[in-house]
Image: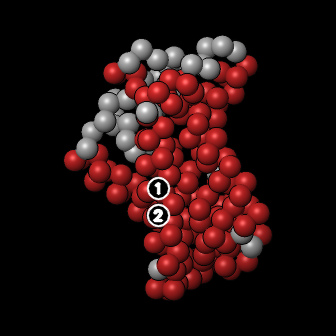
Amino acid sequence: MDYGLFQRINDFAGQSQQLDAVMVDISKYGPLLLVLPLLYLWFFRGAKGKKAALLALAGMGLALILAQIITMFFFRDRPFVMHEVNLLIDKSPDSSFPSDHAIFSFSIAAMVWLQDKKAGWVSLALALLIGISRVFVGTHYPLDILGGAFLGIGSALVVWNLREKLDPVTTFIISIARKLKLA
């Protein structure tokens, strides 16, 4: 089922130069766009927004650490290793599961959503598009994206639920940022 869905999405690659170019750009640079909601929280949503931006980074860090632990015990070859695919970007030798792009994107999007629903929905839509693009360009199976999304959202929720305990740390970082005129 995972490979079948991968094929259905990846078969669109190579059909349109414009679509290919857009999906390659989203796959490579889409996660950078998720910095914008963090900047929005930091600069326009007051102290709670600043704390949420810091918590988003903590959630992403937690998710990426958990992903490294997972890959120590479970290595999954990328689709282009196992199958003939329409590969639109450079090959990566690391484990396909879970997708780091999905972890990054969904952990930030989930934290943004927890703080600001409107910005959060936009962020989640972008995270989903990034995930689809990773399948489209031939570097991940759909379950790699789903696993990364689950890990990213789950880590964001864990950090969000610990936000009161983390408040002294976030408050301290914000005070330093203010002294440096970064907040």
- The amino acid on which the numbered mark 1 sits, given as a three-letter code, is Phe
Few, some or many residues within 10 Å of mark 2 (<14, 14–19, 20+):
some
Q: Quadrant of the N terminus?
A: top left
Does 166 appear above or below 156? below
Image quadrant assignment for residue 2: top left
Does 78 appear above or below 101? above
Give the structural element (helix, strand or loop) at label 1: helix
Q: Is residue 10 visible?
A: yes
Q: Quadrant of the C terminus?
A: bottom right
Q: Is residue 36 visible?
A: no
Residue on which disc 2 sits: 154
Residue on which disc 1 sits: 150
Residue at horizontal 48 percent and vertical 47 percent from the top: 146
Of residues 4 and 93, the one drawn nearer to the viewer in this rendering: 4
- The amino acid on which the numbered mark 2 sits, given as a three-letter code, is Gly
Of residues 26 and 117, the one drawn nearer to the viewer in this rendering: 117
Does 101 appear above or below 138? below
Residue 139, given in percent of the width and then of the height, sits at 46, 29
Residue at horizontal 48 percent and vertical 72 percent from the top: 159
**Mark 1 and mark 2: Cα distance apart in space:** 6 Å
Residue 108, given in percent of the width and then of the height, sits at 58, 58
Give the structural element (helix, strand or loop) at label 2: helix
Q: Are marks 1 and 2 in contact (CB under 8 Å)?
A: yes
Of residues 90 and 172, the one drawn nearer to the viewer in this rendering: 90
Residue at horizontal 72 percent and vertical 67 percent from the top: 117
User: In screen coordinates, is 62 left or right of 31?
Assistant: left
